[in-house]
């Protein structure tokens, strides 16, 4: 018995809390493994080459157009949301004065946006982007809607990452004669890159898994878009459409496998980039 375990056994409350923590961790890990195993068992037998045909038909129910649409949606949504989220966080942390009421209002607004259900975003996108701005059911309308959804997440994670950078970094930069702008972009942001990328990774996961908001904005057309104003379905919408029809349940499970692999690949790639940038 180790010294640490002896210390726990001397205090019953500490032992109880330790067991609760360990049980929670094991339960969370077990649920994750069960979900992954269930999807793989249900979907792997039905992964066929016809599911990756370039053209979608009712015979092959190909998911390749949906995969391409998903990648386009991720790129467009991040291109819109990242500049606003990151620059807003930089203003709040580095430039805004302490006690500024506008800062409190911005933070309250972002926290409120983070708690709104995705179906509300979908209805807003339908009324504003699709109808009022005349974009129709399109990739662009879906990207704008998703960018509003992920904006609070990117902004908050970036803000926390910037706050975690020690003030000694800033003071050393000022002491060497660097200005405010150079200090922010050459010293502070590089040190906060891992946290910023963590928020972007979470945002990508939400984009890839979003369904309700995209049904009302991007539509459910199962073909490759001709341009950003064309309608198209993502992988999650494709999976929902197949399962809701009741005729392609097995293919829906196969789509879930590909969706899971895509999310794992994106997360792994983002973590690799974060490690390289940290070095």
Image (spheres, rainbow, N blue to C red):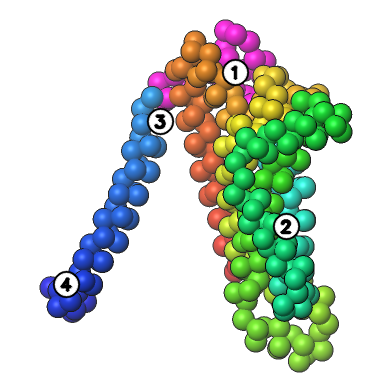
Quadrant placement of the C terminus: bottom right
Between discs 3 and 4, the one toward the N terminus: 4
Question: Is residue 205 inside the magenta stretch?
Answer: no
Q: Farthest bottom residue?
A: 175
Separation of marks 1 and 2 at Cα, in angstroms: 35 Å
Q: Nearer the viewer, mark 1 or mark 2?
A: 2
- Name the residue beneath numbered marker 2: 85
Q: Residue at x 82, y 89 (%)?
A: 177
Q: Is residue 28 left or right of residue 86?
A: left
Q: Nearer the viewer, residue 172 or 103?
A: 103
- Name the residue beneath numbered marker 3: 39
Secondary structure of the residue carrying numbered label 4: helix
Residue 63 image position (x, y, % from top left): 59, 22
In the image, residue 270 sits, relative to residue 247, either above or below, namely below
Q: Residue at x 68, y 34 (%)?
A: 122
Q: Is residue 179 left or right of residue 277?
A: right
Residue 54 image position (x, y, % from top left): 66, 19
In the image, residue 44 sits, relative to residue 113, either above or below, namely above
Instruction: Tell whether label 1 touches label 3 (CB within 8 Å).
Output: no
Between discs 4 and 2, the one toward the N terminus: 4
- Please tell me the numbered disc located at residue 62: 1
Neighbour tally class for label 3: few under 14, some 14-19, many 20 plus, Cα within 10 Å: some
Q: Nearer the viewer, mark 3 or mark 4?
A: 4
- Name the residue beneath numbered marker 4: 12
Q: Which residues are magenta?
A: 43-66
Instruction: Tell whether label 2 touches label 4 (CB within 8 Å).
Output: no
Secondary structure of the residue carrying numbered label 1: loop
Separation of marks 3 and 1 at Cα, in angstroms: 19 Å
């Amino acid at each position: 018995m180790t010294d640490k375990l002896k210390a726990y056994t001397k205090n019953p409350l500490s032992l109880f809390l330790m067991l609760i923590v360990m049980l929670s961790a094991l339960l969370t890990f077990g649920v994750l493994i069960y979900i992954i195993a269930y999807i793989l068992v249900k979907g792997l037998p039905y992964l066929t080459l016809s599911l990756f045909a370039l053209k979608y038909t009712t015979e092959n129910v190909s998911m390749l157009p949906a995969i391409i649409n998903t990648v386009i949606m991720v790129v467009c949504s991040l291109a819109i949301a990242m500049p606003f989220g990151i620059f807003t966080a930089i203003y709040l942390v580095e430039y805004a004065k302490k006690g500024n009421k506008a800062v409190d209002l911005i933070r309250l607004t972002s926290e409120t946006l983070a708690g709104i259900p995705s179906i509300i975003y979908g209805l807003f996108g339908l009324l504003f982007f699709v109808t009022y701005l005349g974009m129709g059911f399109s990739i662009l309308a879906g990207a704008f809607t998703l960018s509003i959804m992920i904006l609070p997440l990117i902004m908050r994670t970036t803000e926390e990452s910037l706050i975690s950078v020690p003030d000694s970094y800033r003071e050393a930069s000022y002491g060497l004669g660097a200005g405010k702008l150079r200090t922010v972009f050459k010293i502070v942001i590089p040190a906060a890159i891992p946290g910023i990328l963590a928020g972007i990774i979470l945002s990508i996961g939400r984009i890839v898994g979003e369904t309700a908001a995209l049904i009302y904005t991007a539509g459910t057309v199962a073909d490759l878009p001709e341009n950003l104003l064309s309608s198209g379905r993502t992988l999650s919408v494709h999976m929902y459409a197949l399962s809701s029809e009741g005729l392609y349940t097995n293919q829906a499970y196969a789509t879930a496998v590909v969706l899971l692999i895509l999310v794992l690949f994106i997360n792994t790639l983002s973590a690799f980039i974060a490690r390289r940038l940290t070095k």
